[in-house]
Image (spheres, grey):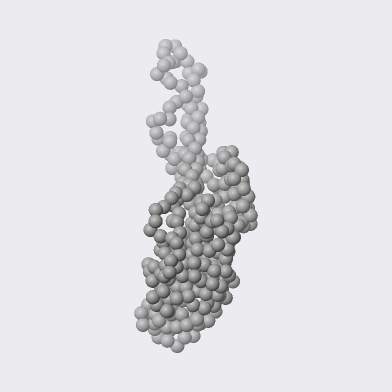
Amino acid sequence: MNNQIYDEATGWLLKHRDGELGPKDKGDFDAWLRESPQHVRAYLEMSAIWEDLPALGADWNATPDQLIARARSEDNVRPLVDTARITGAAADDRRTFPAPQASTARRAYRARFLALAAVFLVTIAGIATWYGLERDVYRTDIGEQRSILLADGSTLELNSRSQVRIRYTHAQRDVDLLEGQAIFRVAHDAARPFVVHSGITRIVAVGTQFDVYKKQAATVVTVVEGKVEVLDRAPASTAPNVLGATSLPLAPAKSGGAIFLATGEQLTIPTGKPARATTASAGDKPQPADVAAATAWTQHNLVFESSPLTEVAEEFNRYNRRPLVITDPGIANIRISGMFSSADPGLFLKFLRAQPELTVEETDREIRIGAR
């Protein structure tokens, strides 16, 4: 299961334990549970672990052992009886003091308690840092996909190796696509535009469904249903939102400053290039899209249509821990067509081995593609 889900479950668990859940938080928690059965599972597992923690010894992992050793060696672990205050006959009456074995046992117990307390403090501090900085960041690992229900009823589906940050305000719904690819199904709310940020490009929708893929060289926007507006990031002043982040206000649509996409259309914006600059080249204007191919990843398929080998390698590496490495620049632009399963890289490698101009060499760390 995604480690981030466990982090989120722990954050909610702490809020429950501290009694800090207000009416809004309770609604958010309910929505979080409903997003995925994995959320329910993670919360129950973390609750069980929390209940077991008081019964753990100080040696439950390496960190407490180190803390115990340090605690036992510190001068601030003082004996329970201050012998400096004992004078006269009382000092000679050993029956009034704990036996050496008992004192040692108390010191060891205290050291164990301090060690566990230190571990708890470090854990809680780490969770607090996450909760303040990353509670609205969602990510997926290699080969993992994840569906998320947002607070406004919109949903997004994250492809493999993807990351988004959600920034909602009363005036606008902002989503930063930090890496990878996602499909957005936007709940209608005319008063709050839904804006996806990918680099300097903004994609605006009110109620629609569209796919945004942030590649190394470009951002590709494909409209599945409805319409979207593609703009540049406005250099206007910013205002803090309820999470402490900033939302960039929408620039008014101007002739040449915005591009409109309808159902079945696709736009490719080169990385770092303003969207309005795409109007200068007919090849960069909205094009008819193969929507089924653009969204095939939701069915764990990869579709290529005369795609250069470099692009194919980039896509392949999103789903596999052993990256595909092109060792000969001369084959970088070989064109590949076909549909392959992202869950079965072996079939794709079999296809590459069948190409007369290519060689395939596998190692434990990578897959080398060279010229024959």
- List x then y, in percent, for residue 197: 46, 61
Q: Nearer the viewer, residue 286 or 199?
A: 286
**Rendered position, 70 above or below 170:** above
**Rendered position, 147 above or below 240:** below
Q: Is residue 207 left or right of residue 238?
A: right
Q: Residue at x 54, y 69 (%)?
A: 227
Q: Nearer the viewer, residue 30 or 245?
A: 245
Q: Residue at x 58, y 55 (%)?
A: 152
Q: Nearer the viewer, residue 155 or 43?
A: 155
- List x then y, in percent, for residue 268: 45, 73
- List x then y, in percent, for residue 163: 48, 60
Q: Residue at x 46, y 13 (%)?
A: 90
Residue 245 appearing in the image: yes
Residue 206 sits in quarter: bottom right
**Rendered position, 144 above or below 79:** below
Q: Residue furthest bottom?
A: 356
- List x then y, in percent, for residue 349: 49, 78
